[in-house]
Image (spheres, grey):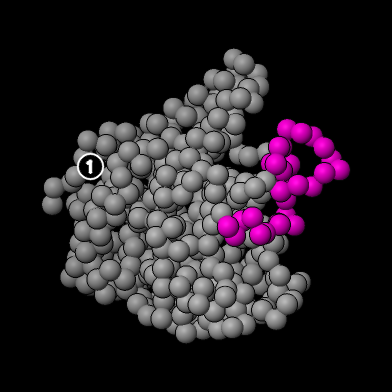
Amino acid sequence: MTHPFSSYRKLFPILENTVQLSSCSQSAMSLPVRQAIDDYLAVWTTRGADWGYWMEQVALARAEFARMIHADADDVAVLGSVSDAASSIASALRFDDGRDGIVTGSLDFPSVCHVWLAQQSRRGAQVRFVQARPGASDTTARLVQAIDASTALVSVSQACFYDGQLVDIAATGAAARAQGALQFVDAYQSAGSRTIDVRAQGVDMLAAGAQKYLLGIPGIAFLYVRPELARQLEPAVTGWFGRVNPFAFDPARLDFAASAQRFNTGTPPMMCASVARASIGLLNEIGVPAIEEWLGLLSAVALEEAPRLGLEVVSPTVPGAKGANTAIRVRNAAEVEARMLAAGFVVSARNDVIRIAPHFYNTAEDVVGALRELARLTR
Ligand SMILES: Cc1ncc(COP(=O)(O)O)c(C=O)c1O
């Protein structure tokens, strides 16, 4: 299979001697990212402090993320983590006016679920976990079925951190809308690897951090809020960057920025923003639709090769039902991860699986090589 992005491989130094297939956890470091960190340090070293430069980097990162999800930059807030984004959203919602339900999937990432459970223990919400079986392709239908007139919020993970299974966020969003509920999308495992169009897919709120398929580092997350909705929400989790003019320095005045900017909290993570500006910029340059297509082909390669090698695939095997990550069941996953690294393959262990999660810079040979090594180590 001809690799369409082979010319970009030289931007990722680790690929010279290692196969990195861990984008569900941490993607490979690229030269533009290293340059962004060097630039940040150079500005700090030579100019001491430069608010203009820092704010510019944050604005550029926001703009790159917005471009990637087909939104306006104003409709994207910058926070420290997806958990922070969920907490900010939760603090702006009410669960005491006849709608108290929060519908979410049982395979969603814990920290987001924990934010919803905190609304149950502290603020009167009722969390309903929809059972999502590993490898299932019916989770969207199950979520849709669980949404009713008591639902305030539907929270979905677009691509599952464990087995990569996908939820059709347009379908769950439409079901939420039909019942007068809102939808929150956790796109941490999908942003950068799948096309997201918040307008076409009718998304209310969507959050993603930069560490995984966005090719960046932790410490920054983006939160999109549909503009008409943002204007109606006043988060109780806030800070000076959520104000109309953060630099007004008026401690007695709590006003809310007109757009999703009201979900900003404290001083934004400037260095992480420089990195995200560079890494998401690279993804936008290549184009996420082409990346999604390549990752689909690599998925097909993994699903074909793994059973041939006697490996047990935990991810959905129905075509189109999973994202880039292919989860393989193993005993002692953490130990297998370490042995794979010693053999030159960076993969990611979670509970009882090894996740093979390529990005655009990976080849079909990378995926097959990792699976063969995995089969050899676990035989
Ligand atoms: C789908 C998903 N959501 C959320 C998180 C965690 O996000 P954060 O640590 O930014 O709160 C992860 C981390 O692995 C994840 O995979």
Give percent across and percent down for residue 239.
73, 46
Nearer to us in this view, 310 or 357: 357
Instruction: Say which quadrant the C terminus sits in.
Output: bottom left
Q: Could you tell me residue 65's position as x and y percent? A: 46, 45
Neighbours of disc 1 within 10 Å: few (<14), some (14-19), many (20+): some
Residue at point 40%, 47% (across, down) = 68
* Picture residue at 65% right of the left edge, 18% below the top: 48
Q: Quadrant of residue 353?
A: bottom left
Question: Residue 362, how many percent across, how many down?
Answer: 26, 48
Three-letter code for the amino acid on which mark 1 is drawn: Phe
Residue 254: x %, y % from top left: 79, 47
Residue corresponding to mark 1: 5
Residue 161 sits inside the magenta stretch: no
- Residue 28 located left or right of residue 130: left
Magenta residues, start to end: 228-256
Give whichever of 288, 177 is nearer the camera: 177
